[in-house]
Amino acid sequence: MRAVSVVGVGLTQWGKRRDVSLAELMVESAMKAFADTKSLTPQDVEALYIGNAQAERFQEQAHPANVTAEYLGMSPRVVARVEMACSSGSVGVRNAFFAIASGQVDSALVLGVEKMCNVSSAEAMRNLCLVEDLTWESFHGMIPPSGFALIASRYMHEYGVTQEQLAKIAVKNHRNGAKNPIAQFRKEITVEDVLNSPMVAHPLNLLDCSPISDGSAAVILAPAKQARKYNDTPVDIIGSGQFMEPSCNCSNMESLTTWRALVNAAKDAYSMAKLSPSDLDIVETHDCFTIAELIEYEDLGLCKKGEGPALVDSGETEIGGRIPVNPSGGLKSKGHPVGATGVAQIAEVSEQLRGECGPRQVDGATVGMTQNLSGFATHHVCHILRRQN
């Protein structure tokens, strides 16, 4: 199996992007990724993967991969739209990774995109509720905010985390996002701001929750042995793992506070990379709600089970700490256009390992990890990246 590298990355501004269509948004990130390479053009790329969750619902546009190929002037040998809700983008990266590793193609463009702000917030939530089992969970009120609130309540019962500790995660990520030029929210907040924001579903307040966003991200992958032909500072993908629970419903999970699918996806990624959590310099996690980031600390092995709150209090997940988490601002501050999130995580870690993140740069970072989930934490994808020597 061939080694695979990231040789180009591109990100659009995230937020409300009513100035462009869905396809135009993807072209924007794609052309930035091509400009990040030495010489690649859309016509050079052999495979195109589009991570997109709900173009039909939000934009009334089906077949986004083929539409975008036309806009880019591409005629790829392989083209596919990947739909795995909030983890669509990272599954697209994983598919492209294995297509190159197996020798099927020698280059791939992965785009993640979602335009969610053209509809009302109520309609957006209705669309997102379709991710869960409509008959057995969504219909009965088990929707994203209430589902993660249930997880937070159970974690509080088992391990004693406070709302103040959860709020510190949001504060950290907004502090990081304030330094990220593409972030949707570039304003720092306080613990008091989080605690005084409107209650969404106890114990989660509005500022514990990631926003509805528009945005697109792009990465270009190539065989590692050819990578320096396209970029002077390539980043290798050295580990990949994907796992899901037996059901997409949280009511069938063994535990709400230990996500077996994440533990297994991370285990596979560490095994492929031949590394352990102590080798990581930076992590981008799926902080759709503050409680999610807390549990991800533990299930990724950054600390032991139940020690997430202490890790928050220690400041070790801050930029400059032992293991910085979400220096991009995460979903909480950067935004969460669901199909784009996983690709954007790969782009952020790649830029960090290349030393290109300015005021949010993690000094000396050489190894990073991304973690992307969908559903009620029932499906997870992890990647480990390392700066090429």
Image: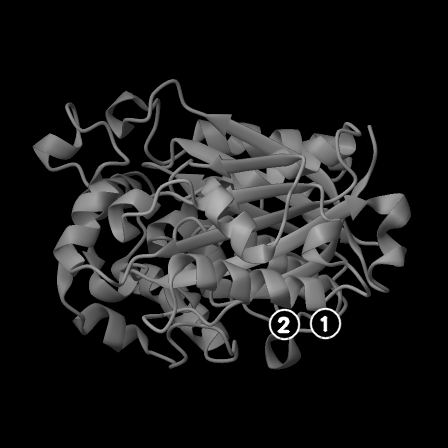
Q: Nearer the viewer, residue 352 or 111?
A: 111
Give the quarter of the image for residue 77.
Answer: top right
Q: Secondary structure at mark 2?
A: loop
Snapshot colouring: one colour
- At x 36%, y 73%, the residue is 19
Is 179 left, or right, of 384 in this rendering?
A: left
Inspect this view and state whether residue 145 appears.
yes
Quarter of the image that includes the C terminus = bottom right
Q: Nearer the viewer, residue 73 or 303?
A: 73
Q: Which mark is residue 363?
A: 1
The image position of residue 44, as x and y in percent, is: 75, 50
Q: Secondary structure at mark 1?
A: loop
Q: Is residue 17 above or below residue 133?
A: below
Q: Nearer the viewer, residue 225 or 239?
A: 225
Mark 2 or mark 1, which has the lower sequence index? Answer: 2
The image position of residue 198, as x and y in percent, is: 14, 67
Location of mark 2 (residue)? 320
Looking at numbered disc 1 in the image, what kind of residue is underneath it? Asp
